[in-house]
Each structure stands twice: as C-alpha cells, then as structure tokens.
Image (cartoon, rainbow, N blue to C red):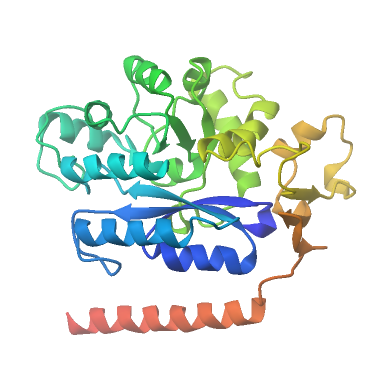
Amino acid sequence: MIRSGTTCANEMYFFPDAAASTFEAVGLRALVGQVVMEFPTAYGNGPADYFAKARAMFTKYKDSSLITLAMAPHAPYTVSDASFEQVVALSREFNARIHLHLHETEAECVDSTHKTPSMMCHQSAEHCRPLKNMQRLGVLNDQLIAAHMTQLTDDEIAAVAAAGTHVSHCPTSNLKLASGLCRVSDLLAKGVNVAIGTDGAASNNTLNMFAEMKMAAILAKAESKVSTSVPAATALRMATLNGAKALGLDAKIGSLEVGKFADIVAVSTDCVEMLPMYSAISHLVYAAGRENVSDVWVAGKRLLANRILTTIDEVEVKQHCKKWHDAIRDHHAEMIASK
C-alpha cells in the first residue's frame, strides 16, 4: 500500500489488534474496524466476545495518533438484528464509524427480500432488502461506511443521501467477483460522499489505489453511458479528501492544507511515459501508476524514500510470506490426499 501512495487505510477483518499494531509499527495511518459476526471464528467465539474485544481496543488505542477505531459488523447475512443494535450503541458511545459490506450482490438483496434460505440471506426476520432493515435498526446514518453498494434503487440512493451515509466504491473487486456496478454518478449527483476502496487482497490482488482511481473513473462512464461522468478531478477527490471524510478524518488529512498532518505522496513525472503532461490531475488518474510513486510521508515521517521502504524489512517480509505459503500449500495437499 505504501508503494502505491496510500497514507491511510480503512481495515476490517479478523485480528484487528494485530493489524493496528502493524500499522503503528510501520508508521501508516489507519481506521481499524472491530469485526462482529454471529458465529465463532479464529478471532472470537461469538458476538459477546467480539464486543468485549472491541471495548478493550477502544480503550487501548484512544490516545493513538495513527490509529482510529471503528465498529465493523461484517454483513447483513452474518450479523443479527440484536448485534446490529449493539453495534449502533457502541458507535454512539465511542463516536465511532461503522464499516459494513452492504448490497454487495443481487443475491443478498433478492434472498433477503423473499427470505430464501441461502448464505446471502440476511439474518433478520424482516422480508425486505438489507438497506431497508439497516434503516429500521438505525445503522443507516452518518457514521456508516457502506462498502460495495452495487444494488441500489433510486429510493435507496435518496435514503443514503438523506442519512449522510458514506459509500466505499470498490470497482475492481466488484468486477472480479461479478458483484455488479455501483451507481457512482447517481450517488454523487444526490450529494452522497463516495470514496474509493480496494477491498481485500483476495478480491483485488494489488491494493493499488492508482489503478483503482483509473478504474473508478472509467467504469463510471460505462455504467452511466456518459463520457463526462466522474472526471479526473472527481476521481482524485474520491481517492483522497472523500476518503478522509468517510473515515471522519477530513479535518486532519485528505488534502494539503495548513494545520493538517503532513501525509504526503510524491509522484515522479519525469519519465517518458508521463510526457507530455498538460494536466497533472488527468495524468495522476489516467497515466500514473504505483511505479511513479517515489516518496511517501505520514505525519511527516518518511515511509518511502526514493522508492525504498524505510520502516519495513522486505527480506524479512518475503521470508514470512514463503513460510506461510508453504504451510498453506502443504495443508491443502494433505486435505486433498485425505479425501
């Protein structure tokens, strides 16, 4: 992420304490979500355990300059109404964002409406689309970061706008998983704050925000059939200031202004591939890539210097990756052999 110019990440999944401590160790800013699900995982044995761990995390990181915490109920199909109500209560208590996968697929919406038994049907007894249920439970508010949102009606877009909910648009993941297309142009037209996300490595692979910016700008034109949809300046804002606003950090980061933290990315434009350049903004979105990022600072600390990582031992990282790769490969082979 650092090499692609990321200075702040929005993270949600298992083992948030390990994620937060790693972000701090390398000097990267992050909003770290406290995952909630209805069933046991390697991280916790159920909702009560997840909520207890969330409280402990809010206490542990309350004075951190780099880490901000959020509640992260995974999705309507993995979280009950009762747990969502607790999420809202904790969000209010700690003034914390809520990060949720919402309306990611058509099956999620259709199966929930008809209460069709499936892994995508929401856990509520309500016969309705998940967003309607989130509205009923008070989850749809100005603290919510709704990821994906590929299945939206006009009325739902109006409801999102009225609630002040933020949308994290993950174009590459939505395409790779054939989830659908987010109506970004319509959301923006209604005043919704739309930011750009990558989703996780399993459904994105590179976590490359430059690639994601370009994809968001181009895909919006195809989805809306309007060539002027999401111009370069809008895509750049979605990847920077809109993202900071979604995380509740726009008073501190997201733009270069007096009084904000020195979270800065330097992009080299002196290579042949970047010439000629008539618009720096257009080039950042349509021509530049992670290979053009030369330096990155977070809170004034240089994390990338002339394309060299300063806080990460790459040799050690490669060794750890190989260790886990081999372990997973061997475990997979054993499972196949035992069948």
Q: Quadrant of the N terminus?
A: bottom right
- Residue 76 image point, x, y percent: 24, 41
At 38% across and 34% down in the image, what residue appears?
180
Q: Nearer the viewer, residue 87 or 209?
A: 87
* Residue 6 in view, yes or no: yes
Q: From the viewer's side, name the closer residue of 57 and 106.
A: 57
Task: Say which quadrant the C terminus sits in.
Answer: bottom left
Q: Residue 155's quadrant in the figure?
A: top left
Q: Is residue 185 above or below residue 37?
A: above
Residue appearing at x 35%, y 24% in the figure: 152
On screen, residue 109 above or below 39: above
Query: Does residue 133 lie above or below 68 as drawn?
Result: above
Residue plotted at (44% across, 83% down) = 326
Q: How many marks?
A: 0
User: Is residue 215 visible to us here?
Assistant: no
Q: Is residue 164 left or right of residue 92?
A: right
Image point (84%, 43%), residue name: 274
Q: Is residue 164 left or right of residue 248?
A: left
323 w.r.t. 113: above or below? below
Spot occupied by residue 196 in the image (x, y as percentages of width and height): 54, 39
The picture places residue 242, in percent across and down from the top left corner, at 58, 33
Q: Pick the residue in front: 77 or 182.
A: 77
